[in-house]
Image: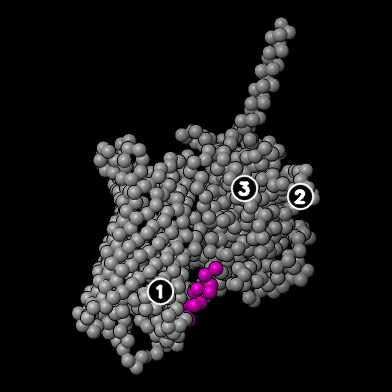
């Protein structure tokens, strides 16, 4: 009997130990409809109070829904309506990790003191969004992430929180386990949080991260009234169960280090909006007081009654009458105005308010925008003699500019073939606009910049007899967003031996992949632009024979690794490894007369093998990559400049997999270019 009792007690203790090792959090408050998708499950299930969560659990709240979970270390995380997060633990110290996919998250973290030297403390909680990483030791704070504008916003209620913009350089993690990937991501978060770019946000202050901002914004105090209302509403309740506050109820905020009136430094990237503004919890945008706002010296913030108001109980931001705040466009009319006078009034108001929103999103591109604006205002000087622009190695002379404008239609196709026939073929159509400007430093040296804009038209995937499952004969539409590519920065040197050219495009932020489920439902929109780092080094030698030109061309290219975010449960990000390419080409030009010419170019390219991870997590190595390109152009020069009608065809093919799968990528560009030389 004693032996049986001993076994029962041992079993209970052992089961309790296993429970603790398996589960990392528990639901302590649930309102509305909240679901969870555990790792390995095919269908989400509804959550009730007391539910336990394992590692990698994906929690989703619906409209007017709320959940509060408690981790094993007693830290609390509260997820607001229309939000999604994934919870995890990593490392020997079992630090919690929350990936905030979208929405609002409020967290209270129990402070832990580690035994590190010099009194250092370790982060007990990490929070990650697509654009930012946050490290927490012991504090109360709220973080917002908006998927549409990819803005991450942080508001600290107690203590201090570290936040930093994520590094965009992707590592190849295709051969690592999920746990190893999680540990690597944690190391990367710790790295950026310990860097000089990291910002510490104290009590009562806001900081944000935007893809187009160079750095995390400097912390600023928000409206004391909104801070107090949000502080008290830790369960994100509605107004019926809350009370109004007066100025005597305001909770003290930490002193602000950044100038209260704000700062905007293009060179350093430092940016802080004017203090005292409102944080919109839906869009993640900070609405700063305008230029006519007044400083309240007692509270240490600016006040502006024209930028909107607050819900007197919840602290929710309310835009000015007749307006609403869009996460991408900023302030827009709430409805169409039939009264012209009223419509003009609202239009003026929108322009004023959106100035502050624009500064938060476009500081990085401010210099480039003003540069092109000045170019538009330049009055071109007429040359005394019409310069020939038909030179196949056209570059500006010292002190001169060459401006290029390219517009066209582009078709992209990608086909996959297996042993049993064609598996799939993807086709995308888009229009594009390219803007190029080159300046002559000397008669031999010149520098240039190129930016491309893409406007998607249509995209689809057709599945053939070799496709898996029941996809044979299925055609699925895909959706892409407007995007830009660049800047491509170039430097050229020209002498009697030929033309040497170097091109560099820095790596940009990660983007979302275009994903459609087998039923035709659009799950994600993607981008056509080149996000990875690009480097090119080339040499071109040209010979002239009577009216004709002949050129030989060799080019070395490097394409950096690329990662496309896949924000869908049980799916992995699409990761494409880096590759190097050597390209040789011959070019011929027949000058029909002084103003017309025909130009033809043929390219042959060989690339190194490239790793590729698909959405299901499988990895392949694409090998034997060969490319063959053809370029045709008709050129005509008149007093306005050089006009060109061109057709470019590119084809690249390779093999992957043990069963000899073949991938073929084709691109066709049809367009019109305009080139003009001028000097100031």
Horizontal side of 409 relative to 351 (left or right) equals left
- Residue furthest to the top in view is 1
Dots 3 and 2: beta carbons under 8 Å? Answer: no
Q: Horizontal and vertical percent for residue 138? A: 73, 47
Q: Is residue 376 magenta?
A: yes
Helix or strand or loop: what does disc 2 sit on?
loop
Label ID, residue 436: 1
- Residue furthest to the front in view is 497
Helix or strand or loop: what does disc 3 sit on?
helix
Q: Horizontal and vertical percent for residue 158? A: 74, 52
- Image: magenta residue range: 364-377
Q: Horizontal and vertical percent for residue 535? A: 45, 63
Helix or strand or loop: what does disc 1 sit on?
strand
* Quadrant location of the C terminus in the rendered image: bottom left
Which residue corresponds to the image point at 58% horizontal and 45% vertical from the top-left?
Answer: 184
Q: Crowding at label 1, few (<14), some or many (≥20) Cα neighbours within 10 Å?
A: some
The rendered magenta stretch, by its main secondary structure, is classed as: helix
């Amino acid at each position: 009997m004693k032996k049986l009792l001993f076994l029962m007690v041992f079993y209970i203790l052992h089961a309790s130990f296993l429970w603790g090792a398996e589960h990392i959090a528990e639901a302590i408050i649930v309102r509305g409809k909240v679901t969870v998708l555990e790792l390995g499950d095919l269908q989400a299930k509804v959550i009730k109070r007391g539910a336990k969560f394992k590692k990698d659990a994906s929690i989703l709240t619906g409209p007017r829904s709320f959940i509060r979970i408690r981790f094993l270390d007693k830290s609390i995380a509260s997820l607001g309506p229309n939000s999604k997060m994934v919870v995890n633990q990593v490392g020997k110290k079992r630090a919690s990790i929350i990936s905030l996919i979208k929405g609002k998250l409020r967290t209270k973290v129990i402070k832990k003191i580690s035994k590190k030297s010099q009194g250092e403390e370790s982060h007990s909680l990490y929070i990650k969004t697509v654009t930012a990483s946050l490290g927490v030791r012991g504090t109360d704070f709220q973080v917002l992430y908006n998927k549409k504008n990819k803005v991450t916003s942080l508001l600290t209620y107690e203590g201090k929180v570290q936040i930093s913009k994520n590094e965009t350089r992707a590592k190849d993690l295709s051969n690592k386990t999920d746990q190893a990937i999680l540990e690597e991501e944690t190391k990367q978060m710790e790295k950026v949080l310990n860097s000089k770019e990291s910002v510490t946000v104290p009590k009562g202050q806001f900081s944000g991260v935007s893809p187009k901002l160079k750095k995390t914004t400097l912390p600023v105090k928000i409206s004391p009234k909104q801070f107090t209302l949000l502080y008290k509403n830790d369960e994100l309740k509605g107004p019926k169960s809350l009370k109004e506050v007066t100025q005597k109820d305001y909770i003290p905020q930490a002193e602000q280090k950044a100038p209260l009136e704000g700062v905007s430094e293009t060179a350093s990237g430092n940016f802080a909006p004017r203090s005292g503004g409102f944080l919109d919890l839906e869009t993640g945008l900070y609405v700063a007081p305008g230029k006519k706002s007044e400083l309240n010296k007692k509270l240490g913030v600016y006040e502006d009654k024209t930028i909107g108001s607050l819900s007197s109980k919840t602290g929710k931001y309310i835009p000015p009458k007749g307006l609403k705040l869009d996460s991408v466009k900023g302030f827009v009319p709430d409805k169409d105005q039939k009264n012209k006078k009223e419509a003009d009034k609202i239009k003026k108001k929108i322009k004023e308010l959106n100035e502050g929103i624009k500064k938060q999103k476009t500081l990085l591109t401010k210099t480039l925008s003003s540069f092109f604006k000045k170019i538009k205002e330049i009055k071109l000087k007429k040359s005394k003699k019409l310069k020939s622009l038909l030179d196949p190695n056209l570059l500006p002379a010292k002190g001169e500019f060459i401006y290029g404008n390219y517009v066209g239609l582009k078709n992209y196709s990608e086909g996959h073939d297996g042993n049993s026939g064609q598996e799939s073929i993807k086709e995308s159509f888009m229009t594009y606009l390219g803007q190029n400007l080159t300046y002559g430093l000397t008669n031999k040296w010149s520098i240039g910049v190129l930016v491309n804009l893409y406007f998607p038209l249509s995209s689809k995937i057709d599945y053939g007899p070799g496709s898996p499952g029941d996809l044979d004969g299925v055609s699925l539409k895909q959706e892409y967003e407007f995007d830009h590519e660049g800047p491509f920065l170039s430097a050229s040197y020209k002498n009697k031996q030929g033309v040497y050219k170097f091109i560099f495009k820095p790596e940009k932020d990660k983007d979302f992949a275009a994903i459609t489920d087998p039923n035709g439902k659009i799950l994600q929109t993607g981008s056509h632009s080149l996000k990875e780092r690009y480097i090119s080094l080339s040499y071109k030698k040209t010979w002239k024979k009577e009216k004709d030109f002949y050129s030989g061309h060799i080019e070395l290219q490097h394409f950096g690794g690329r990662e496309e975010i896949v924000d869908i449960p049980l799916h992995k990000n699409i990761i494409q490894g880096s590759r190097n390419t050597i390209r040789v080409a011959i070019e011929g030009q027949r000058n029909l007369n002084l103003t017309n010419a025909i130009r033809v170019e043929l390219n042959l390219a060989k690339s190194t093998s490239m790793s590729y991870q698909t959405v299901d997590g499988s990895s392949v190595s694409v090998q034997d990559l060969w490319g063959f390109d053809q370029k045709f152009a008709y050129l005509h020069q008149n007093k306005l400049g050089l006009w060109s009608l061109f057709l470019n065809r590119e084809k690249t093919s390779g093999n992957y997999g043990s069963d000899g799968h073949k991938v073929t990528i084709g691109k066709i560009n049809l367009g019109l270019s305009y080139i003009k030389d001028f000097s100031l």
